[in-house]
Image (cartoon, helix red, strand yellow):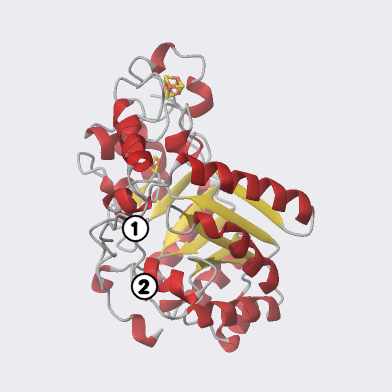
């Protein structure tokens, strides 16, 4: 057993309800029902236990976290506990009054997502016509005094619009923009054929990113999240399994990362049955891939094993059915052909071929958001 390090961040997925239906949603394929969501009292206990564990940042996410009417109570508890708070939002449902009450409760920052540079891209990717609401949300966030952080997931259907996407975010007053190339598990894996970019598209987008980063300098911080399928080595996912952060799902089940619910061969514990300290330090699921002792070859004897920790456990499971295998993205992985085959298809395919998109299944209309 490797001694448990201290976690730094908590992703509090307070609900899976959401007004959007994104084709790359990072929530599990089986969404948690609203009736199974943790109560306010449960979340207050979880936040208290997180602070006791050493967590310093709480990211309120979903679904759309604004759906929860008790968000202010949770943010206020974080402030009492000395925890930094960040709201990850689609912006739908954000009013000036709500922003004001969240800031009064102690909210420190907000991250607004967009799907592209225009209404058509929001409709195509998220089956929503509310691009106007996103612009309004950006105005509200800035008006509330919070810094405006933005995020866009990049893929085959919007990469060629990168210049225009950056223009929109700069125009709306973003101070930081995360350009997140899609990661292919969950809903995005279902839609991989439609979303996987070509090498040419990516090369052009990297040029745009570099040019705009140099132009914008300190004014807007641009971050490029690597498209791992095109990399020779995997990303150090989550900074290593159960090493720096944990995710509490709406129903109270605790995961080492937001996607791990998809690993159906593992059992994860709930805050209904155990406290966070036990789950973090002792639960079998958190211990399973902590450190490097669990690694098979080629990772076991690889000099990069403390750099990328063998890659992503969720991706290994999604592609091979075994979460304990080397991430197939790695050129040394015996399963690497799964990646090169997918890239070959993406690069040979006629860009005009239409692939039907599978949208995240409809959820409750999120109370009119
Ligand atoms: Fe990383 Fe394992 Fe590949 Fe080495 S063999 S680069 S540790 S994934
Ligand atoms: Fe779960 Fe990478 S997304 S470990």
Which quadrant holds residue 283?
top left
Q: Position of residue 300 (x, y in %)?
A: 40, 15
For the image, the number of numbered tags is 2
Q: Quadrant of ligand 2?
A: top left
Q: Position of residue 80 (x, y in %)?
A: 61, 67
Label 2 packing within 10 angstroms: few (<14), some (14-19), many (20+): many
Which quadrant holds residue 334?
top left
Q: Give left or right: position of 179 versus 92.
A: right
User: Regarding mark 1 in the picture, which secondary structure is present there?
Assistant: loop
**Measuring 65% from the left and 80% from the top, which residue is drawn there?**
139
Q: Position of residue 59 (x, y in %)?
A: 52, 60
Asked if the beta carbon under badge 2 is closer than 8 A to the nearest atom of ligand 2, the reply is no
Label at residue 226: none
Label at residue 27: 1
Which quadrant holds residue 352?
bottom left
**Measuring 46% from the left and 76% from the top, which residue is drawn there?**
66
Residue extending furthest toward the top: 301
Residue of label 2: 18
For the C terminus, the image quarter is bottom left
User: Regarding mark 2 in the picture, which secondary structure is present there?
Assistant: loop
Q: Is residue 28 above or below residue 295?
A: below
């Amino acid at each position: 057993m490797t001694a448990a390090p201290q976690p730094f961040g908590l992703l509090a997925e307070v609900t899976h309800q959401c007004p959007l239906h994104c084709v790359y949603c990072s929530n599990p394929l089986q969404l948690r029902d609203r009736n199974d969501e943790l109560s306010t009292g449960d979340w207050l206990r979880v936040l208290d236990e997180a602070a006791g564990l050493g967590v310093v940042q709480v990211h309120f996410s979903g679904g759309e976290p604004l759906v929860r009417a008790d968000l202010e109570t949770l943010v206020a508890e974080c402030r009492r506990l000395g925890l930094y708070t960040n709201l990850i939002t689609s912006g739908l449902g954000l009013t000036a009054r709500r922003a004001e009450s969240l800031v009064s409760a102690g909210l420190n920052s907000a991250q607004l997502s967009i799907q592209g540079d225009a209404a058509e891209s929001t409709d195509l990717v998220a089956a929503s016509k509310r691009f106007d609401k996103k612009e309004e949300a950006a105005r509200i966030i800035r008006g509330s005094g919070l810094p405006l952080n933005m995020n866009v997931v990049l893929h085959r259907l919007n990469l060629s619009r990168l210049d225009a996407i950056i223009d929109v975010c700069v125009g709306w007053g973003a101070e930081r923009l995360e350009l997140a190339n899609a990661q292919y598990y969950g809903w995005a894996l279902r839609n991989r054929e439609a979303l996987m970019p070509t090498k040419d598209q990516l090369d052009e987008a990297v040029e745009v990113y570099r040019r705009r980063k140099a132009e914008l300098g300190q004014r807007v911080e641009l971050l490029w999240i690597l498209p791992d399928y095109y990399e020779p080595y995997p990303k150090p996912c989550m900074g290593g399994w159960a090493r720096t952060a944990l995710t509490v799902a709406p129903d109270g089940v605790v995961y080492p990362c937001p996607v791990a619910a998809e690993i159906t061969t593992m059992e994860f514990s709930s805050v209904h049955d155990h406290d966070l300290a036990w789950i973090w330090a002792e639960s079998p699921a958190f211990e399973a891939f902590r450190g490097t002792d669990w690694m098979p070859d080629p990772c076991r004897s690889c000099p990069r094993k403390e750099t990328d920790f063998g890659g992503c456990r969720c991706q290994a499971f999604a592609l091979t059915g075994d979460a304990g295998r080397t991430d197939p993205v790695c050129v040394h992985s015996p399963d690497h052909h799964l990646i090169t085959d997918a890239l070959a298809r993406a690069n040979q395919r006629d860009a005009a071929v239409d692939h039907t998109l599978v949208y995240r299944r409809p959820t409750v209309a999120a109370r009119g958001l």
